[in-house]
Image: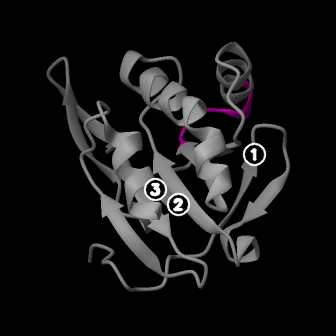
């Protein structure tokens, strides 16, 4: 069943790109922007990450934390984050367990082959741990502005 606005965000613990474990519930009372993206170093994912980077100070000023999640390895995240100077952590979900919890791991077709892939999506989680907003099947252009506007 898909997650809905107003319900408690599923809790999880994942490692960041530097190996530090992060547990969602331990981030309270901060707001959290949790964005799921398909793959490091691909055009859309790079654009989205860089858009969050460019707006990072504005998000920080609202008290919100930005976290990116994909199924890439820790080493891939380290390189991606360093290459684009991303000021926020990237969480490692290699087995896709958190992606499944949030309903963003779906069948995709690429080059005629069907497989499981991450649907680009963002969840805004409020200070109490409830889902305040959801963006699914995100189009990168202007997405970060939409998320920021929902915060203010």
Read off the residue under disc 2.
98
Any part of residue 97 in sight: no
Residue 14 falls within the magenta-colored stretch: no
Q: Secondary structure at mark 3?
A: helix
- Give the residue at x 44% y 31%: 48
* Region rendered in magenta: 70-75
Q: Which mark is residue 99?
A: 3
Tell which of 144 and 97 is nearer to you. Answer: 144
Q: Quadrant of residue 134?
A: bottom left
| Alpha carbon separation for disc pair 2 and 1 | 13 Å
First-in-chain label (3 vs 1):
1
* Residue 80 sits above or below residue 63 on the image: above
Q: Secondary structure at mark 1?
A: strand
Residue 73 falls within the magenta-colored stretch: yes
Any part of residue 64 in sight: yes
Read off the residue under disc 1.
16
- Give the residue at x 38% y 43%: 145
Q: Which mark is residue 51?
A: none
């Amino acid at each position: 069943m898909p997650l809905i606005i107003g319900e408690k965000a599923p809790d999880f613990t994942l490692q960041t790109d530097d190996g530090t474990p992060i547990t969602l519930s331990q981030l309270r009372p901060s707001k959290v922007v949790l964005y799921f993206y398909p793959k490091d170093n691909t055009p859309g994912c790079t654009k989205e990450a860089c858009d969050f980077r460019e707006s990072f100070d504005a998000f920080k000023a609202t008290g919100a934390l930005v976290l990116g999640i994909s199924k890439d390895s820790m080493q891939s995240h380290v390189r991606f984050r360093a290459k684009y100077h991303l000021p926020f952590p990237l969480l490692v979900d290699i087995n896709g367990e958190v992606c499944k919890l949030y309903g963003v791991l779906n069948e995709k077709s690429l080059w005629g082959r069907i497989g499981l892939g991450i649907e680009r999506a963002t969840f805004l989680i409020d200070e109490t741990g409830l889902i305040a907003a959801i963006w699914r099947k995100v189009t990168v252009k202007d997405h970060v502005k939409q998320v920021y506007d929902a915060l203010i």
